[in-house]
Each structure stands twice: as structure tokens, then as C-alpha cells.
Image (cartoon, grey):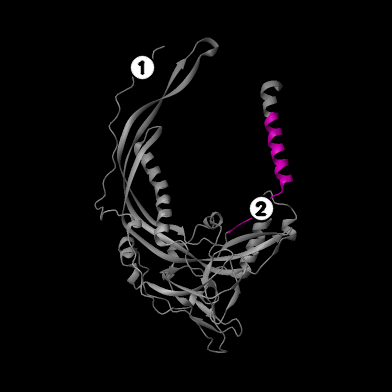
Amino acid sequence: MSVPKPPRPPRPHHSTKPTTVSEECTDPDEVVIKEATPSKPTGPKRFPCGSCGADLEFKPGSDALKCPYCGHENAIPKSAEQIEELDFRAYLAKLANSEQTEEQTSLKCDACGAEIDKPPDVEALACPFCGSNIVATAQSRRLITPRALLPFKIERGESRARFKQWLRKLWFAPNAVKKFARLEQPLHGVYVPYWTYDADTTSHYTGMRGEHYYVTVGSGKNRRTVRRTRWYPASGVVWNRFNDVLVLASKSLPSKYAERLTPWDLPQLVPYDDAYLSGFRAERYQIDLVEGFATARDIMADVIRGTVRADIGGDTQQIHSIKTQHDNLTFKHILLPVWISAYRYRERIFRFLVNARTGEVQGERPYSWVKITLAVLGVLALAAGVWWYFQVGR
């Protein structure tokens, strides 16, 4: 039978243009950062107890420092400072002389590459990320200072309980892991570095819109309905607004597990204050501002592709090209709290992380191949039973 002539293609759909799209997009990799004149190195502050003189530590879930010996507490004054978004391109251009960078002293773990604050009067300590001993001369380098952080909310004891609950719920894990797994090292509280990026994007695209239709082909027992697609050219412009695109700035954590610690309650960020770090470690970023934006740009690109497909419409779409301009690009350097440890099972070490705001646990785990094999055989047996029922049993 003949195929009906396709209708005239509809006019390409265009989005409504926003009121403002500002500043030309420049490649951040082209910005040259001049060498800075070193300033006086700084280190973490100490907060002595007014009662016994010991160092106070931040008490998770509160706004106070607490003495681990006598229990004396000091409230952390609430800051009226606003958490400011910094202009990305302008900041890169003047990074060398910016007030927001400082010479910071840190220790680097040779085993995993983590860089952490050098605690006062400490020359050797265990790396909170891999457990290796760090005995090294502190190094100083010029870094962008954190603008904000999320304070620890989940205490060490609750994190340990969350870890045990997580172990009990692991699918396809050996039964013995829930009984014999033991912590290989203490839980370490670490502030992990992140970047956040905001941007308004303008994306010009070209592509094709596909619309399905159905025809009947064949005759007799071979007669059947077939789906076919008419394709029409499409082009247009879409706009997206991105807020707090989060990028991990550490190479010490296993990224696939760190990414699963989301969501983070970023609206609860507080202005950076050394008091929140007392009693905890803070890692320095290893992924710099420009490298972090490359990751953020990829995250944005996935969202933009979805917007383009929605704008093309139809039943299916093909995207030929997308050219995106990033305007009003801003960033923040922030610290997020994580409990880090490792457990041992049958002489193997498995690392795990706990979101110190929500208690979410992610990490490495063993598998029982016996359980997996039995599950696969069960699925195959079920599929064979269904096939037999429809082919033979009826």
C-alpha cells in the first residue's frame, strides 16, 4: 500500500529570550595568573579553654566549642557576614594579588596525595584518608581561602552506628561481614574542599525533530504494523540558570562514593570561621578553580542537552550541535564535613565515608559470589518457567 505524503514540517520552536544576557564568554584557560609575592604563612587557630587551658573542640550539632576534659563550652558568635559569590573571570584576572588568597601551611601524604592542615605542635600524624603515617616538613602555597562551610552535625558515635546499619543492609554481602567486620582505624572528621559555580547559559543548537507514524505492511500471516519516523530540521536558542553546581575539589576521596553523599543542605552554609575546624582536619583543594569549572561545565552540559531536547519537541530528537555561552559566572570555595574511616574483613581494607550532616554512608564493600550466582540462577529459572508456560503449558 502507498505511504501518505508527510505533512508540511511545522515551524521551528524558539524559546523566549530573557531580559539580560551579560558579558562575553572567555576561556578561563586563557587567563594568565602572575606569580604572587609570598605572604606570611598562616595556620589553624587554637582556642584554649577558659577553665582548664586545654584546646577547645567544635561540638557537632551545636554552635559552640567544648572542652574534651572539663566540659566547659564557649559559644561561637554568629556572623552577620553574607556568603558572597565571587566573579569567576574577574577573580582569575587578579588572583595573584587578591585579598581572598593566603599563604597556607599544610602536610602532604605521600601515600594518597591528600593535603591537610598542619595541626599546631604536631610533626607526625596518621592521614585521615588512608591511615598512612605522615612525617614530613610542612609546605606552604598560595590558596584561595574558603568562603563558607557546613559545620559537623552528626557526632562520631552516631556515625559509627550509621556505619553498622549500612553494613547490615548491604545486598549480596557475605553474611559474616556483618559480624566480623571491624574498624581498622578511628573515625576521622575531615572538612572536604568543594567548589560551587553559578551561571546563566545561552545555548544555540541545531538538530532534527522526529515524529512517529505507523503503516501496515505485508499480507496474510506476515501482515504487521511498523513504526516509522519523519524527520524535520530544528534549531533554536535555550537559556538555563544554574545555582550551586557542586564540584569535589579533592583527589584523596574515591569520587564515586563522595558524589553519592548528596544531597548537601547548602542553604545552611555559614560564613567560614576557624572555630568550626577546631578538633577536626581540613583538606586543601587539589583541583583548582579552573579545573573545577571544567567539571562544572560538563555537569551543566548534561542539563542543557535535556533542555534542548525539550525545546526541539516531537517524539524523538537528534542534536547536531550546541554552542553555549556562560554569563554571570560566579563561584564559592566551601568546606563540607565528612567522617572517614576504614574497616577490615578477611585481611582486606575497605574505606567508607559518612555525610556528617545527614548520616548518609557510602563506601567500598565485599561481595558474596555465592549469593550473586544463586540470584542469577534464580532469575534464569524464573525466565525459563515463564517461557515454558506461554509456549508449552497453555
- What number is the disc on residue 170? 2
User: Taking the image as drawn, is residue 70 in sight?
Assistant: yes
**Which circle's residue, 1 or 2, is located before the other in the chain?**
1
- What number is the disc on residue 4? 1
The answer to if 383 sits in the magenta stretch is yes
Residue type indicated by callout 1: Pro
Determine contact: label 1, label 2, CB under 8 Å.
no
Q: Secondary structure at mark 1?
A: loop
x, y percent for residue 256: 54, 54
Query: What is the quadrant of residue 341 in the picture?
Result: bottom right
Side (left or right) of 385 relative to 235: right
Q: Main secondary structure of the magenta part?
A: helix
Question: How many other residues sit within 10 Å of disc 2, few (<14), some (14-19) or many (≥20)?
Answer: some
Side (left or right) of 215 relative to 346: left
- What number is the disc on residue 299? none
Q: Image quadrant for the C terminus?
A: top right
x, y percent for residue 297: 39, 52
Q: Is residue 72 above or below residue 192?
A: below
Residue positioned 68% across, 65% down in the render: 184
x, y percent for residue 361: 59, 59
Residue positioned 61% across, 57% down in the render: 363
Q: Secondary structure at mark 2?
A: loop
Farthest residue, direction top: 220
State which region is magenta: 361-385
Q: Image quadrant for the N terminus?
A: top left
Tally of numbered discs: 2
User: Taking the image as drawn, is residue 394 in sight?
Assistant: no
Residue positioned 70% across, 25% down in the render: 388
Residue type indicated by callout 2: Leu
Side (left or right) of 161 relative to 143: right
The answer to if 241 sits in the magenta stretch is no
Q: Is residue 261 above or below residue 277?
A: above
